Image (tube, rainbow, N blue to C red):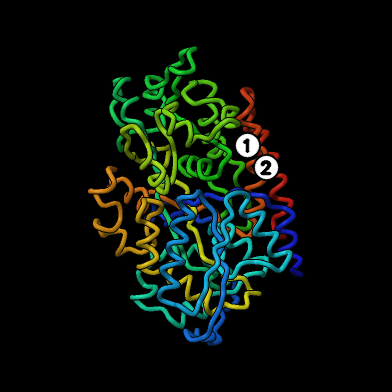
Amino acid sequence: MKNSKAIALIAMSAVALSACSSVNPAPGAAPAASTPAPNSTPASTSAAPKFDPNKKATIKYSFWGDTDTKALHVAVTEAFMKEYPNVTVEPVYIPAEYLTKIQTTFTGGTQPDLINFTANDLISFAAAGVLEPQTKWIKGEWDKENFGDNFERLMKAMEYNGEIWALPRNSAGRTIFYNKRIFDEAGVKYPDSTWTWDTLIEQGKKLTNSSTDPNKKVFAIGFQGEVSDIGASYIWQAGGDYFSPDGKKFILNSPESRKAFQYLHDLIYVHQIAPNPSVYTNGTPQSLFMNEKVAMHFDAGSFIATMQKAKFAWDLALFPMGPKNRIGALSPTSLAIPKDSKNKEAAWELAKFINGPKGQEILISTGFSAPVRKSILNDEKKYLPGDKFKVDRKVALESYTDHSAVKPTNPIWTQTDTIIKKYLGLYFLDKNGKIDESLKLIENEVNAIMPK
C-alpha cells in the first residue's frame, strides 16, 4: 500500500480491540462529543455499481474474538452464502493482535474485502485514505426495511469528513456483572440504581476478603484502568473528556480526568478492594471473575455469552452513579470495505446481510451482542429472551440506550489510545503513581501528533 498516511498509522499504532460496542446516550446524558465536526467536503454522489447476483465472486471477511465468537461469524457467512450461492466468503479469523495484523495486510496489498473495525479505529483508517466510502450505497438504498431501523446515533459513529464509512455490526451496553454468592455470604444487598462511587467503596470493603489463604482471598472488583473502555467510562462519569467538541484540542489533562483516575487508583491502593494490576500477567479481570476471585466485573454486554458457562449465580447492574452521570464507554463494531478491494459490490451485500435482521438475529443468539436495530432490540423473544437468559434484561437495555457514549471517533484516536495505555499502565502499577505527571506526559505526546 502506497498511502503515506496509512503507513504512518501502521507505524504508530498497536492497539488491542474489544468486541464491545455502543449507541450514544440520550440527549443531555452524554459528555461532549469526541468526534471532529465534518468539514465541507460533500458526500460522494456518484451512483454505486450494482451487485450482479449471477456473477461469481470470492470475498474475504476478517474478524476477531474467541472461538465461540468465531462460530457466530462463520454461521453468519454460511447463512449469507445460502442466499447468495454465487458468492464464496472466506473467513479470516485473527484471534490476537488483530489491528496490527490488519495493518500489515494493507501494507502488503492482501487486505480482506470486508473488515471488522471498532468505530474508533474505523475513522483512523478512513482518514488514512485506505477505505471505500459507503455513502453512495447507503444513500442509494436507504429505506425502512434495509437501514432505517438502525440506531441513528450508531450510524453517526460511522461518519467522518462528510462520508459514511461503514455499517454497524454489533453493539452492547456496559454494565457491572456481579456474583450473587459472594454478595449473599458478605450480607451485602445486590447493586442497584442507588449505588454511587462512594457506595462502591463502602460495600466493596464488605465484599473484600483479605485472607492470606489464596483460596479464600476475594476482592470486590477487578479492572484495568488503562484500558479505554474503563478509563473513558470514569472520565465521562466525572465530567471530563478526551477531545474538545470540534475534535481539534486534546483535553484529557483536566481536573475531571485526574479525579477519575485517582478514584480508580485509590480503589487498589487506598481502599484495597481491587487487586494490584500485576495479577493480570497471570490472568485477566474476566478470568478472575469467572474463577470467583472478584465479586464484580465491568464489561460489555457481549460478556453475557461467556457468562453462560459460569458455575455460579450472577446478574447485571448499572454502573454506580458518578459525580456527573453513570455513562459506560463503548465501541460500535463496523463493517468496512477497503478502497482496493476487487469485489466491493459483493462485500457490500455481505455487510448489508450482517447488519440486516437475519445477520443480527444470528449474532445476538448467544448473548454475544445487542442488536444495532431498534425493532430487534425491543423484541423480547429475540434479544435476551427470558427462557434462555437469566439476566436483568431491563438493565441490559437501559445501559445500552440511556447510559452509554461512543469512545472518540477522532482520526488520531488509534495512536492516542496507544499513548494513553502506555503511561496509565505504569501509573496503575505504581502505588505512589502521580496522575498529574502521567497526564502531562500523555498530553505532550498526543499534542505532538495532533493535526496542525
Question: Percent from the top left, x then y, of residue 109?
Answer: 71, 68
Image side of residue 426 versus residue 365, left or right: right
Q: Residue sitting at 48 percent across and 86 percent down?
A: 54
Q: Is residue 245 visible?
A: no
Task: Give the label on residue 424, or none.
Answer: 1
Question: Percent from the top left, x then y, of residue 202?
Answer: 38, 23
Q: Residue sitting at 34 percent across and 75 percent down?
A: 145
| SS assignment at label 1 | helix
Question: Percent from the top left, x then y, of residue 8?
Answer: 74, 59
User: What residue type is disc 1 on?
Assistant: Leu
Other residues around mark 1 within 10 Å, as few (<14) / some (14–19) / many (≥20): many
Distance between the Cα atoms at labels 1 and 2? 9 Å
Up-down relation of residue 428 to residue 47 (above or below)? above
| SS assignment at label 2 | helix
> Which image quarter is the N terminus in?
bottom right
Up-down relation of residue 435 to residue 370 (above or below)? above
Question: Percent from the top left, x then y, of residue 191?
Answer: 32, 33
Looking at the rendered image, the disc whose residue lies closer to the viewer, 1 or 2, is: 1
Q: Residue sitting at 62 percent across and 36 percent down?
A: 424
Pick the front one: 87 or 413: 87
Q: Are marks 1 and 2 in contact (CB under 8 Å)?
A: yes
Image side of residue 254 versus residue 444, left or right: left
Between disc 1 and disc 2, whose residue precedes?
1
Task: Give the label on residue 442, or none.
Answer: 2
Up-down relation of residue 186 to residue 164 (above or below)? above
Pick the front one: 290 or 337: 290
> Which image quarter is the C terminus in?
bottom right
Please tell me in which quadrant of the rendered image residue 392 appears: top left
